[in-house]
């Protein structure tokens, strides 16, 4: 359940204004590209470094859509270069930080083209039980992801603010057992990082990468895949 909602949004392709849209192939490519990025993120969160490396490798070789304007190529190459650098990550923290840089290259490309990715918006889940609070935690993490790549700073900060407030109670996540100290520390670390990310002057990519690493470490300690 811990990672079930990390794919909460089906995710439409990034919307390209009609004056800039080169064709249907690009729309389909954008959707596939988005899903590929999300699957790479999910591999990292569940602690599957080898799967993430394989996905980085494919991303580093991915050609752009054939109907895209030539002016797109430098931005696409910047994303591929970031993916090539991510392939060499030696551990999960390094890989999550590298992934955040790949996502940032996507956001920079969208900004340069005057495009904002239009992604499905799901209402904030309600409820006070530990499972419901975990769903809110996952919803907030998804908002940060969508805000980072959008780029949509307001959505990113909204997700971070909710995540900073979401009560993650390790004792309630493992009923009848005492959680490892590393789990307690990871929960505290996640809230601290989210609080920093909610500020207007936050370094979005760096904090998102650190947060992913913290989530992966916590999930690994809990045996959540």
Image (cartoon, helix red, strand yellow):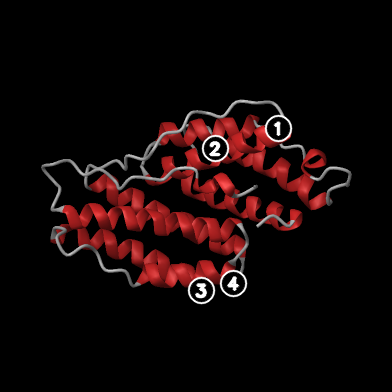
User: Which residue in the protein does label 3 denote?
Assistant: 88
The reply to whether the C-beta atoms of the residues labelled 4 and 3 are less than 8 Å apart is yes
Disc number at residue 139?
2
- Where residue 132 sits, quadrant-wise, is top right
Disc nearest the viewer among 1 and 3: 1
Q: Determine the secondary structure under disc 3.
A: loop
Say whether disc 1 or disc 4 marks the residue closer to the N-terminus. 4
Say whether disc 1 or disc 3 marks the residue closer to the N-terminus. 3
Residue in view at x 50 percent, y 48 percent: 7
Q: Determine the secondary structure under disc 4.
A: loop
Q: Is residue 203 visible?
A: no
C-alpha gap between disc 1 and disc 3: 35 Å
Say whether disc 2 or disc 4 marks the residue closer to the N-terminus. 4
Is 61 positioned to the left or the right of 47 in the image? Answer: left
Locate the C terminus by quadrant: bottom right
Disc nearest the viewer among 2 and 4: 2
Disc number at residue 167?
1
Say whether disc 2 or disc 1 marks the residue closer to the N-terminus. 2
Is 150 positioned to the left or the right of 168 in the image? Answer: left
Q: Determine the secondary structure under disc 2.
A: helix
Residue 223 x %, y %: 73, 57
Disc number at residue 90?
4
Question: Could you tell me how many numbered marks the image carries?
Answer: 4
Reply above or below: 156 against 57. above
């Amino acid at each position: 359940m811990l990672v079930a909602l990390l794919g909460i949004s089906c995710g439409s392709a990034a919307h390209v204004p009609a004056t800039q849209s080169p064709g249907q192939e690009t729309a389909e490519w954008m959707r596939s590209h988005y899903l590929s990025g999300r699957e790479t993120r999910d591999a990292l969160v569940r602690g599957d470094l080898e799967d993430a490396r394989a996905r980085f490798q494919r991303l580093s070789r991915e050609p752009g859509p054939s109907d895209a304007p030539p002016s797109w190529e430098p931005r696409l190459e910047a994303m591929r270069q970031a993916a090539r650098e991510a392939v060499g990550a030696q551990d999960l923290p390094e890989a999550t930080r590298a992934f955040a840089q790949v996502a940032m290259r996507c956001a920079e490309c969208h900004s340069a083209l005057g495009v904002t990715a239009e992604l499905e918006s799901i209402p904030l889940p309600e409820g006070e039980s530990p499972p419901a609070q975990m769903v809110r935690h996952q919803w907030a993490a998804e908002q940060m992801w969508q805000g980072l790549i959008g780029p949509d700073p307001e959505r990113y900060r909204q997700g971070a603010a909710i995540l900073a407030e979401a009560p993650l109670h390790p004792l309630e996540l493992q009923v009848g057992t005492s959680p490892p100290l590393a789990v307690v520390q990871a929960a505290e670390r996640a809230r601290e990082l989210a609080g920093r990310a909610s500020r207007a002057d936050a370094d979005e990519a760096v904090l998102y990468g650190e947060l992913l690493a913290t989530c992966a470490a916590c999930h690994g300690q809990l045996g959540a895949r």
